[in-house]
Image (cartoon, helix red, strand yellow):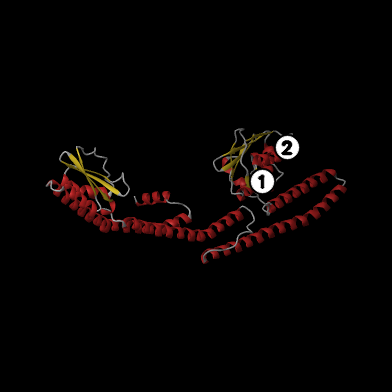
Amino acid sequence: MFYGLNKFFKSILPKKLFYRSLIIVATPIILLQIIITIVFFDSLWIKANKGMTRSLTSEIQTMFDLFQQENNQQVIIDLYNKNFDFVVMLKKNEILPERKTERWFSPMDRSLRRELKPIFQNSYWFDTTTYKELVDLRIKYKNGILQIFFPKYKIAPSSARIFALWITLPGLLLIFIAIIFLKNQTRPIVNLAKAAEKFGKGESTTGFWPSGALEIRQAGYEFDRMRKRITVHLNQRSEMLSGISHDLRTPLTRLKLQLAMLKQQDLAKKMGEDIEEMERMLNEYLEFSRYQKNEKTELMNISHLIRDVTKKYEEKQIKLFLEECPKINIRPGSIKRCLANLIDNALAYGKTTEIFTKKMMNNMLILIDDDGPGIHESEYQNVLKPFYRIDKSRGQNKLGVGLGLSIANDIIRSHGGNISLEKSSLKGLRVKISLPY
């Protein structure tokens, strides 16, 4: 049961740190105000209201008793009008109005009703809403009514509104100050999260600098050091592979020249194929190492980008089913390289390739289908690993070293997206790409 309640509260509580912190600060203030208000109304306002109403009804009862003696009624009316802030009128041949819907939620109406009922039973009527500052009280008297107007302050303490104002304004002021301070405290955390997200996607984080509280600033400094170490490592890897490639190209070129001079053409042809395979491997190694180079992010339409990539495949069997989609932030060069790898892979194993784009809730979906032999489900995750090659079906191609899908996977993940494999509608392989926007 406790676990269920805990899960329920977690589901309704806000997820962001700012709003959670605001609840922690604002809840005690609101609870304190509620408690003070309840105590005030119970111990002060209600008791004062009850005493004032009881005093007023005593004055009205006294006047009504004097009226019943039928001696000098006009003199009594004049005296009450002069000395008690009353406006008293005797209206003959009139009856009490129909009783209005009683306002049970009003403390003023409840206290007035509670004091008048034991004295006048059901022979009275009052209205506290028609006039802003006056109460209209009517009491049945013989064949007419006695109408009395008196100020509301006689039964309602004026300090209630002032108290409500002073208890509300400071609370709102404290919550407003808390919002300002919490914004300043959570902003560095938000900036750190955005910088980490950008760095994870391979984007530049030059605009980030550590700020905020000591712990948050320290986390920012550590993130900056980590970013620099990773950047240096990636650059060193790219430079090392570039150097290896450059060093190997020279002997490969010499071998090509020597093969061209060989008289045994059959042997020269076989050795030439091996050298070309080595060059292809070097090119794929280089592509794998340098695709993460810093490239500016641009707001682009993915459907237009796909059309640009497929222009070089005019004679191939590529069918496009592209929806009009919103622009998303991408690194165009990396995405083009990713799409080219996937299309090349589809065309290498199948005769027909279909490309779809669909707009989901917060994601852009790209589907690349082919009618090739496909891949067994158990190999879906493995073929996304670097340098992994399968022996059957699609693995019989000798032109690569198993980096095409791995490069595409890393590019999509660096954009915050996801890539997965499944069986296509053409009975071949489907590559499913999801990019956020």
In this orientation, which residue lies closer to the viewer: 21 or 61?
A: 61
Q: Quadrant of the C terminus?
A: top right
**Residue 12: % across, % down:** 42, 49
Query: Which residue is under mark 2?
Result: 313
- The relative height of residue 393 versus residue 247 in the rendered view (above or below) is above
**Where is residue 358 shown, x and y percent of the image?**
59, 37
Residue found at x 67% / y 40%? 304
Q: Which mark is residue 335?
A: 1
Q: Of 131 and 364, which appears nearest the observer?
A: 131
Q: Which mark is residue 7?
A: none
Q: Is residue 345 visible?
A: no
Residue found at the far bottom of this picture: 214
Circles 2 and 1, Cβ within 8 Å, touching? The answer is no
Crowd band around label 2 with a 10 angstrom C-alpha radius: few (<14), some (14–19), many (20+): few
Circle 1 SS class: helix
Using a 10 Å C-alpha cutoff, classify the residue at mark 1 as few (fewer than 14 neighbours), some (14 to 19) or many (20 or more). some
Residue 136 % position (x, y): 26, 45
- Mark 2 or 1: in front is 1
